[in-house]
Image: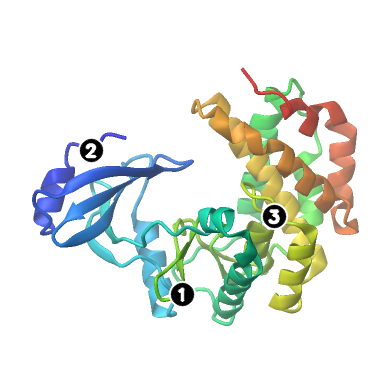
Amino acid sequence: MIPPATAPHFLNQAGWSGAQIVPLAGDASFRRYFRVLGNGGTAVLMDAPPPEEDVRPFLAVADHLHRLGFAAPRVLARDVDQGLILLEDFGDARMREMLDAEPAREQQIYSQAIDLLRELHRHPAGHELAPYDMAVYQREAGLFAEWYMPAVGLDLPGGYEQAWNEALAPIASHQSTTVLRDYHAENIMLLPDGSLGLLDFQDALAGHPAYDLVSLLQDARRDVSPELEAAMLARYGHVDDAAYALLGAQRNAKILGIFTRLWKRDGKPRYLAFQPRMWRYLERDLAHPALAPVKAWFDAHVPVEARAAFWAEPRA
């Protein structure tokens, strides 16, 4: 977490000359974050180095969210060519840690998060958002086949893509809503005024409203009880249970592939600890009749011992 060599010049140009740069966080991508202290306050420096990262989608979605009245960090300075953005600092009150410290607030904070989604879904998706279509669904679901299957010593037989095509066909053209895609407890901030701030939204697409409900309530990094999940779905209002299960299965298969890739390719084995939770979600989603063709494929080609039990011990 050493700041990029160009950071001091960038900050000087932005009016933050001599500011202290402190490591803040990294994530599952190539992006890194630093807190900048100086100029009478703090800010956050995003380092998203090209060609691996492109900051333009982040900037476009931030503008879209601001226009709709949602709290995305204000952009204080930018250098698109170098992948540097100076952002408003939302502080340290992240939903995940707040709930760990104050579990009694769980119902209240999740209710706020659901209300935010319900308000977001009142607005049409922005024209700057690409569609969440079958090609994207298949590319994401394909990460399970590409990374997970060989990691547990399984060959990839045919029929995987066709099973997803059959299952997802009823919802693949539903592209009316802004889908943030990573809306969960580690990307939601509790702001001083009591509202919620949004992070990590650069991959937003125009898709189905059930997707972000899945992101929040089938959280890869935090257990959400079935009782809380049911209460929050009821609070949101009408939710197509087939769409919720379909997108849950698709997302959870994708995440199983991504977390395996983070281990095998990127040397980040800590993500493997989440695999059993993802299997619990996936198997529950697959039980819905709408997932029949996908469940049949998993039952035929991914034995029980290659599922959650495989991750019970740390991988080498």
Crowd around label 2: few <14 · some 14–19 · many ≥20 (10 Å): few
Residue at 14 percent across and 50 percent down: it is: 19
- Amino acid type, label 3: Gln
| Residue 175, image quadrant | bottom right
Task: Work out how far the residue at label 2 is from the one at label 1, CA to CA, in angstroms.
Answer: 34 Å
Q: Is residue 307 visible?
A: no
Decide: is 224 above or below 4.
below
90 with respect to 303 (left or right): left
160 with respect to 300 (left or right): left
Crowd around label 1: few <14 · some 14–19 · many ≥20 (10 Å): few
21 with respect to 115 (left or right): left
Decide: is 271 above or below 155.
below
Decide: is 159 above or below 134.
above
Which residue is farthest bottom? 122
Residue 95: percent from left, percent from top: 52, 59
Residue at 44 percent across and 75 percent down: it is: 70
| N-term-proximal mark, 1 vs 3 | 1
Task: Work out how far the residue at label 1 is from the one at label 3, CA to CA, in angstroms.
Answer: 24 Å
| N-term-proximal mark, 3 vs 2 | 2
Look at mark 1 in the image and give the residue it sits on: 194
Look at mark 2 in the image and give the residue it sits on: 4
Crowd around label 3: few <14 · some 14–19 · many ≥20 (10 Å): many
| Residue 159, image quadrant | top right
Q: Is residue 300 visible?
A: yes
Per the image, label 3 sits on a secondary structure element best described as: loop
Which residue is farthest top? 316
Location of the N terminus (image quadrant):
top left
